[in-house]
Image (cartoon, rainbow, N blue to C red):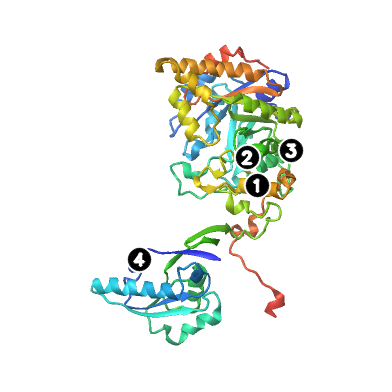
Amino acid sequence: MIIGNAKPLEEILEMLEPFDKIIVAGCNGCVTVCRVGGQKEVEITASALRLARESAGRPIEIREETLERQCDPEYLEQLRPFVEDYQAVLSLACGAGVQFMAEKYQSTPLLPGINTDFIGVTERQGEWSERCQACGDCVLHLTGGICPVTRCSKSLFHGPCGGSVDGHCEIDKSVACGWQLIIDRLKALDRLDMYEKLRPMKDWRTSRDGGPRRIIREDLTQ
Amino acid sequence: MKAGSNLEKVLAAGHFAVTAECGPPRGADPEGMRKKIGFIKGNVDACNVTDNQTSVVRMSSMAGCLLLKEAGVEPLMQMVVRDRNRIALQSDLLGAAALGIHNLLCLSGDHQTFGDDPQAKNVYDIDSIQLIDLVRRLRDEGKFPSGKELAGAPKVFIGCAVNPFADPFEIRVPRLALKAEAGADFVQTQCIFNLDKFERYMEDVRKRKLHEKVAVLAGVTPLKSAGMAKFMKKNVAGMDIPEEVIKRISAVDKKEQAKVGIEMCVEMIHKLRKIEGVRGVHVMAIEWERKLHKIISQADLLPRPAI
């Protein structure tokens, strides 16, 4: 899922400076699961903002809404009947949700309430880590199910570099060396022979480097 | 001859090669570097010029190489894939070859979080092994990856680096095999202090006959003090300094430690020279270039062959 992180309240208050009547919009998708932008966080954020603005002598009116998803047009439509009664929307969805809402409501300022960080997994309650960079050309079948693009700090296709020590990466002892993980896994699978294959230079066009990406599936659009 | 560089000729003639390293300055003033070059001249077959090592901004490697050339020392340009994509890497390589730089060392580069600009975007469009493969194709096939012809192929002797001591040990030799397959002509190793481990590494290298494909230049560094040895052991990733090395240099008075450090370095070169498959030595006298002559002379490697 997409993992996000709350923006500091001070930063949000600064964004909200020109406004007195807003909607705080949550999303029931990924950001609910990683506990940063669901209904509960909408309530907490709205209360914190009301309190802060009241104590600053500039009370703010907030409507709390949590949509099923902010990345699908039909759910975004649910705000249409009343969105114009408000000066701005603070969205707690990921960057995709905030932007999609902004596209739908051209005359309403859209503000991001969270930072969108990565595509990752829940390691344990309160800990998430990155697994995928969405490069658009998966090689996990070649690398023991561990992604060199994401898990190696240098995205090497023939790692590890000389900085791998005791299983950790040169950048930080708390970061596992992605290539040590790949090699351990290939060994466990008895496929270390796969290590000694020259991999051609990656075609990054399928990644963000080819410009913003789009998928059109004719079987579904017709 | 693939590139016709002095280093290639020295190795081809069967001499035990000597290379050293020179870091460019953190500024535009070339005088400090010229002074260091003065200590290097006459003692080596080629001298590496680092490429923003430890991710700290320095004068470019290509400019440093030209300063060496100007002084009559053959340059060996280090190129890391951290900061440039394949377009810039190829362009700089063509420029370097046009300016008479015919030795190249292909490296990953330290991650940018080490330097003064940890906020920088890391590029890593290709990795160091893919760079070796790319350079070999430019040189030998005279074609860009697109298949289009080059107007003049770059004549470069292609090098790579290995750390025989980094983890995981079992893929260290396979990794050299990958580099050889990609097209490396020579390899410079990380500083060797653990001779036993390096001998085991070379044994595996010989088993796979990699030493016949790639000229191995064994890396050495003279220790200036016991403090330096301890610092390197603790802080440099993949640096293997055995306890007995630290004990030996710590056993003498501080004033005598530099002298012992040089003695140990010279002894190491003599021992490395006896290992089958070691074709030369890469002396990394970091900011201690003035001792280079003494080390190489005491290692009985002077004068350098003139070919």
| Whether marks 2 and 3 lie on the same chain | yes
Discs 2, 3 touching: Cβ within 8 Å: no
For the N terminus of chain B, the image quarter is top right
Residue at which label 4 appears: A9
Residue B215 numbered mark, or none: none
Spatial separation of the CA atoms under disc 4 and disc 1: 43 Å
Q: Quadrant of the C terminus of chain B?
A: top right
User: Do callouts 1 and 2 mark residues in contact (Cβ within 8 Å)?
Assistant: yes
Residue count near mark 3 (Cα–Cα under 10 Å), binned few <14, some 14–19, many ≥20: some
* Chain holding disc 2: B
Amino acid found under the numbered disc labelled 3: Glu
Q: Position of residue B64 (x, y in %)?
A: 52, 31
Please give the chain letter of the residue carrying mark 3.
Answer: B
Chain for numbered disc 1: A
Badge 4 and badge 3 in a common chain: no
Secondary structure under tag 1 reads helix
Q: Which residue is mark 2?
A: B168
- The residues tagged by marks 4 and 3 sit, at their Cα atoms, a distance apart of 55 Å
Q: Which residue is mark 3?
A: B181
Circle 2 SS class: loop
- Observer-side mark, 2 or 3, equals 2
Residue B86: x %, y % from top left: 62, 46
* Tag shown at residue A184: 1
Estimate the spatial distance between the alpha carbons at disc 2 and disc 3, rounded to whole Å.
20 Å
